[in-house]
């Protein structure tokens, strides 16, 4: 994955004109992201699978998000090797797998975040509304049982996300190939049929709308409606506990949305730039591309801290697991 501005969107070979500082800095940054992301997401997976108290509906989504984030960090050593060798040495099959995993990262992060947002929306709504009033909130629901959150339902929803993302990623797997760039060096990227520029634009629009705009708009709408309802209920009841719950939800909303937008907005803005103009691959453009790409990869490091490590029950379960191993 690269936020480059050329028609070949993939793990491109670095330009010979690129500053030597970038040649050294990029492997270091990618290695840190890989180590922290892999360790953090592995810890999340182990704690959720081993600690009985962590087997909750919300943690099913956190588990799947950790799997997706951990999977995305595994391609970083391949990217580092390509960057250092200045060519693609791994063959076409690995190229297809790497680009597919990269695009899994793009789509799965936002869609699992959207699934978690729906779950939290229902949780908070159930807390502040008596069960019989769900008929007013959700007109299509005929029974309160429909809104009951179950472990099985979360697994089915997660499976649907994986299947949906797999369908969205299939075109990128098909077009991924090893080609020779202007210097006749093997590179891994997306090779489109003619007219190549039109296909390139279509792929950017496809990724930006389905992988970012739609899920983020849905998340904003959910949290916006949730805050509106919490504000209205607080005005009616004046309960202090409700005010505290509102503050927690507000912090959660700001944290989730801020980190998501911080990590992914530059990447998708780069896609918009790529649609509007064809910038020359100068050292500045290539450096900016790698900075943006590193920021999007960093999201896989931050998610474990945001969704799990800030949870008191997770910290206790994690420490308990460590103490048991030491014992």
Image (spheres, helix red, strand yellow):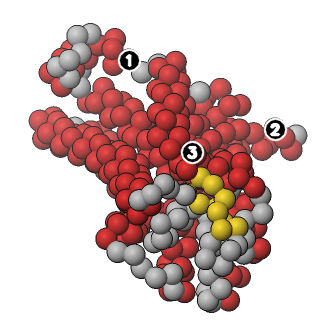
Q: Secondary structure at mark 2?
A: helix
84 relative position to 291: left or right: right
Q: Is residue 92 visible?
A: yes
Give the CA separation, mark 1 to mark 2: 35 Å
Residue indicated by mark 3: 174
Q: Where in the figure is residue 67, as x and y percent of width and height?
A: 62, 41
Picture quadrant where residue 10 is located: bottom right
Residue closest to the eye, 310 or 118: 118
Residue indicated by mark 1: 148
Q: Where in the figure is residue 255, as x and y percent of width and height?
A: 40, 56
Q: Is residue 251 visible?
A: no
100 relative position to 239: left or right: right
Q: Which one is in front in this view, the residue at disc 3 or the one at disc 1?
A: 3
Q: Which one is in front in this view, the residue at disc 3 or the one at disc 2?
A: 3
Give the CA separation, mark 3 to mark 1: 40 Å
Which callout, 3 or 2, points at the residue further toward the start of the chain?
3
Q: Secondary structure at mark 3?
A: helix
Residue closest to the eye, 166 or 6: 6
- Mark number displayed over residue 324: 2
Give the CA separation, mark 3 to mark 2: 46 Å
């Amino acid at each position: 994955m690269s936020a480059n501005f050329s028609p070949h969107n993939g793990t491109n070979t670095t330009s010979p004109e690129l500053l030597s500082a970038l040649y050294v800095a990029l492997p270091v940054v990618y290695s840190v992201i890989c180590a922290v992301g892999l360790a953090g997401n592995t810890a999340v997976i182990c704690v959720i699978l081993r600690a009985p108290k962590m087997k909750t509906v919300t943690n099913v989504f956190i588990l799947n998000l950790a799997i997706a984030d951990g999977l995305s960090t595994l391609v970083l050593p391949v990217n580092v090797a390509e960057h250092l060798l200045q060519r693609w040495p791994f063959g076409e099959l690995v190229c297809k797998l790497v680009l597919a995993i990269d695009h899994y990262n793009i789509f799965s992060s936002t869609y699992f975040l959207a699934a978690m947002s729906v779950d939290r929306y229902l949780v908070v709504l159930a807390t502040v509304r008596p069960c019989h009033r769900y008929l007013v909130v959700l007109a299509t629901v005929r029974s309160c049982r429909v809104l009951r959150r179950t472990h099985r339902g979360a697994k089915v929803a997660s499976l649907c996300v994986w299947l949906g993302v797999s369908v969205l990623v299939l075109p990128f797997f098909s077009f991924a190939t090893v080609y020779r760039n202007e210097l006749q060096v093997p590179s891994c990227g997306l090779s489109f049929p003619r007219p190549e520029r039109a296909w390139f634009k279509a792929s950017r629009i496809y990724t930006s709308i389905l992988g970012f705009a739609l899920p983020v708009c849905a998340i904003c709408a959910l949290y916006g409606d949730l805050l509106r309802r919490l504000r209205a209920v607080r005005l009616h009841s004046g309960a202090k506990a409700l005010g505290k719950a509102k503050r927690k939800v507000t912090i959660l909303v700001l944290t989730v949305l801020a980190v998501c937008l911080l990590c992914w907005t530059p990447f998708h803005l780069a896609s918009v730039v790529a649609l509007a103009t064809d910038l020359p691959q100068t050292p500045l453009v290539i450096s900016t591309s790698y900075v943006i790409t590193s920021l999007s990869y960093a999201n896989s490091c931050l998610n474990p801290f945001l969704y799990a490590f800030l949870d008191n029950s997770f910290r206790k379960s994690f420490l308990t697991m460590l103490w048991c191993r030491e014992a």
